[in-house]
Amino acid sequence: MIQIREADITTLSVDAIVNAANETLLGGGGVDGAIHRAAGPELLDHCRGLGGCRTGSARITPGFALPARFVIHTVGPVWKGGQSGEAERLRSCYLESFRLAEESRIKSIAFPAISTGVYGYPSIEAASIATQTMLENESDFDVIIACCFSAADVTVYETALGRKPPAPSN
Ligand code: APR
């Protein structure tokens, strides 16, 4: 089942939450900062030993002080106008996160809108890629949550999933 929820991802009691990280895996702002703050310093200590993560790849760690058992850290592409392979790299973030989740027998997973904050990826295009991969992997999980941080993003995801008619274009 795919759920669209407006929530702070650090509060979700799911098997795994996905972090929109950077290649150092040493924390940052946005959802990365929120997850590190909520997980506590052990997460950063653990990440220091991982040796980073390439854009489009993913790494899994314990959730430490988070309600979630695991954190899957993935590094989205920085938006450069759409002609530099951004779509393929963003799709890879979701697919690699799902692959690691299946390897760890994770059955409930929540994703933020990867790359749509600091990295500037347009929300509608990113949601289209995200929801396409969620539909492709839906049968392997009990629940997949698209965790939106704004009501506007909820509408973007509902439209992307065909759960809400697109706004009339005037
Ligand atoms: N819960 C859920 N979603 C959140 C939260 C939260 N607590 N905080 C932010 N978001 C949302 C943002 O509103 C945005 O929709 O996560 C989405 C991704 O935004 P960013 O966190 O800015 O991530 P991204 O655009 O992928 O940029 C990654 O930012 O924080 C740094 O270290 C990070 O360098 C990396 C870059």
Image (cartoon, grey):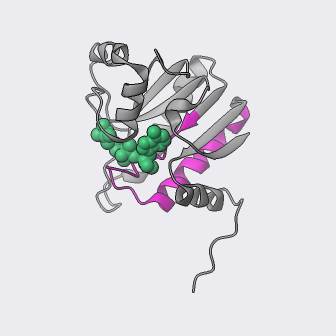
The answer to whether residue 158 is left or right of residue 101 is right
Which residue is depicted at the point 35% across and 52% down?
85
Which residue is depicted at the point 37% across and 34% down?
32
- Residue 136 on the magenta segment: yes
- Residue 46 on the magenta segment: no
Q: Quadrant of ligand 1?
A: top left
For the N terminus, the image quarter is: top right
Q: Along the line of sight, which residue is nearer the eye, 10 or 169?
A: 10
Q: Quadrant of residue 165?
A: bottom right
The magenta span reads 110-139
Question: Could you tell me residue 5's position as x and y percent?
Answer: 62, 45
State whether residue 89 appears in this view. Answer: no
Question: Could you tell me residue 124's position as x and y percent?
Answer: 50, 61
Question: Could you tell me residue 84's position as x and y percent?
Answer: 31, 55
Q: Quadrant of residue 47?
A: top left
For the C terminus, the image quarter is: bottom right
Question: Could you tell me residue 44's position as x and y percent?
Answer: 31, 19
Which residue is depicted at the point 32% across and 55% down?
79
State whether residue 1 appears in this view. Answer: yes
Residue 73, above or below 55: above
